[in-house]
Each structure stands twice: as C-alpha cells, then as structure tokens.
Image (cartoon, rainbow, N blue to C red):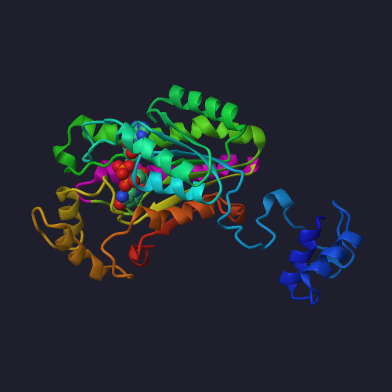
Amino acid sequence: MPAYNIFRRGMLKGTARMTALAVMNRAKAQAPAGQRSDTDPRDLRGQPVPEPPDDKSAGPIRPGRGSVLTGKVAVVTGAARGIGRAIAVEMAANGADVVALDIAGPVSTASNAAPATPEDLAETVRQIIAYGRRGESIRADIRDIAALRAAADHVEQTYGKIDIVVADAAIQRWKLLLEMDDSDWLDVIDNNLNGTANTIRAFAPKMVARKQGRIIVLSSMQGKHGTKDGSSYAASKWGILGLMKSAALELGEYNITVNALIPGLVDTPLTRYEKRLSESMSEQGQKMQNPTPQQAWDARAPTAALKVGWLQPDDISPAAVFLASDAAAMVTGAEYEVTGGDSAKSA
Ligand SMILES: NC(=O)c1ccc[n+]([C@@H]2O[C@H](COP(=O)([O-])OP(=O)(O)OC[C@H]3O[C@@H](n4cnc5c(N)ncnc54)[C@H](O)[C@@H]3O)[C@@H](O)[C@H]2O)c1
C-alpha cells in the first residue's frame, strides 16, 4: 500500500492528527508497498474494506492535480480555431504537448460557418509553442479514418504515447427539417457523429495498449433537447452522448475515461453570423431578422443565470483540462456542462 494512500485514508477518516510528513513516515515504516497497514482505519468490524487500486484512483490530494498536465501528450481535433483552439492552448499552458488536428478548409456545403484556414491552424500551433510545449499541426479530415489512424501512428512515434484525445471538430446547419437537402442531414451526421466515432476508433487503440487515456468529446446543450431549425446538428450531438457513454463502458477496463464536454452558446465562427443570432433570439421567443450582436446579447443575457448572452472559448477549455487531468480519474461516462447558467434550466 503506497504511503500516500495511508495518508489519504487517515485524512479522510479524520483520524490523522499527525502532520502529513509524520503520516507518510509512519506509512513507510508500517506499510510496505502492496500491503495493508495494521493501523488502517477503514474496516468494518475488523474486516478490511476493499479500495480501488492506485491506478484506479484520483488520489491523493495535492495542489494543482485538477489542472496539471505536465508530461502528457494531447491530440485535439477542430483545433484551428474556436473551442478546439482554446482547449489545445489551455492544455499546453498547463504542461501538455499538443498536436492540433484540423481540416483547415471547406468541410461541406451543409455548414453555415466560413471554413477555417491553414493560417488559423498555424496560429494555434504558435500559441501552443509560446507556452514552451511541443506542438504541431496535422491537416486531416475526421471523416477519413485512414488519415486519423496515420495521424495516431505519427503522434505515437513522435511523442512516444497519446494520453489525451479531444474530439472537438464539428459543423452546424440551421435549416428546417422539411427544407433540408440530403447533404444538410447526411453531411452533418457524417461529419459530427461518424467523425467523432472515427476519432475514438483511430486513437483509442494506442491508449488501450498502454492501459490509460482520456477521451473528451464535444456535445452541446442542443444534444440534450430538441432544436427547432437545427435537427441534424441536434441529432448528431445527441448521438455523440450515446457514443460517449458506450465507449466509456467498453474502454473503462483499460483505464480510459470517456466524457462529454457540453458548452452553452459560445462566440466562435460556428455561431457568429446573423442566422445563428436570430435563432438564438427565437429560442427566447423573440423574432427578429438580422439582429445586431448587441440585440442578440440583450435578448439572451437576462435569461441566463449568470446574465451573459454567450461565453468565450476559454470559458470552456478549463473544464477540458480538468477532465484530462489525474484528478478526473474516476470521472467517466459523464456530461460536463459549461453554460453560463443554461444548465439550470434543463435536467
Ligand atoms: N460555439 C458554440 O456555441 C458551441 C456550443 C456547443 C457545442 N459546440 C461544439 O464545440 C465544438 C467546437 O465548436 P466551435 O464553436 O469552436 O466551432 P468552429 O467552427 O469555430 O471550429 C470547428 C473546427 O472544426 C474543424 N472541423 C470541422 N469539420 C472537420 C473535419 N471533418 N475534419 C477536421 N476538422 C474539422 C473546423 O475546420 C474548425 O476549425 C463543436 O463540436 C461544436 O459542436 C459549440
């Protein structure tokens, strides 16, 4: 039994009146690795209560364990801009080497947003490197699983391992279901849902081989309720939650956690255009063609618990760092919402 577990037990139980050092010393003296301590307070009428092994534990308490990613290697899809860039850079700022993967070009006619560019992707890498970490870009399409598998091989060969994968890349379509072209449905589902599954299928085998890893997928509040005029996007984001929970069940035995990050409305190129602003107003029961950003903010902000119209990408990224950290070892199959308060209005 490692010393820290003894300390952790004593502290949680409230029986350790000694300093941390004294407890550690006692543990060293009385509990060689792999053995229970005679002084262990966790028993039931003399019968020891089993605990998870160290590799299935977030313990012990230590400063920064929920944010430190030192020595870890992360791959982030959709990293050219928006939330993906913020996650990539936030992970680098907290110690990870980060590979930024993005198509950095047109995805589909069924995307309302302007395409990201190679310059956007290069800027993400510049910001990663500015934090003193290794970083590089890979231009790849998440719909192309062969390209993702090649990327996984490359990252493993170059960095020695893959600790963290964030499946962020997605597109959005605002169109009435009955007015959709086939591509408005099929491309959104293919890109967002199949692409996220491809990302897990390509990268997770590297984690299975090492029996550890963190997978974070991006869903949305639109993946938790219906979205008028946005059915293909909402369906893709609901599907990602089913994928996430299923993958968590399958990969847990390899110490791989799989969780969904659920942003509220965030100002990115995905959302910064008139159609999205008018949709966000109609979600509040207000109809207006081509509202200004200020009008859209003023309509939304009073309805949110924290009185913000929308969030920024770097409001979301700290939660990704936590989910990727050692502290989140026992978090899997879960949805982690960062919404400025929209969460307070849903189950
Ligand atoms: N912005 C929001 O309000 C919001 C809210 C909830 C969830 N999300 C989710 O967060 C994630 C990021 O969204 P964002 O707002 O930063 O969007 P964004 O458009 O700013 O960035 C998305 C990135 O994904 C890339 N991408 C798209 N399809 C790709 C493909 N096939 N292969 C490789 N790269 C591809 C794009 O090139 C782009 O760089 C998405 O999954 C989105 O659904 C966003």
Q: Which residue lies furthest to the left in this view?
A: 289
Tell me the residue at 56%/48% (across/down): 95
The quarter holding residue 347 reads: bottom left
Instruction: From the top left corner, tell me how far across and down residue 120 is, in percent.
Output: 33, 38
Residue at 17%, 32% in the rendered image:
181
Q: Is residue 281 visible?
A: yes
Using the rendered view, name the quadrant where residue 232 is placed: top left
Confirm whether the magenta stretch covers residue 1. no
Magenta stretch mostly in which secondary structure?
A: helix
Placement of 105 over or under 212, stated as above or below: above
Residue 33, percent from left and from top: 85, 52
Magenta range is 228-254
Observer-nearest of 48 and 140: 140
Q: Residue 237: in sight, yes or no? A: no
**Residue plotted at (11% across, 57% down):** 291
Q: In which quarter of the image is ligand 1?
A: top left
- Is 219 situated left or right of 30 in this image? left
Q: Position of residue 308 (x, y in %)?
A: 28, 66
Q: Where is residue 250 in the image (x, y as percent from the top left)?
A: 57, 39
| Residue 231 in magenta stretch | yes
- The vertical placement of 9 against 15, above or below, is above
Above or below, 291 against 129 in this view is: below
Q: Which of 287 and 91 is in front in this view?
A: 91
Q: Which residue is drawn at 23% across and 30% down?
A: 183
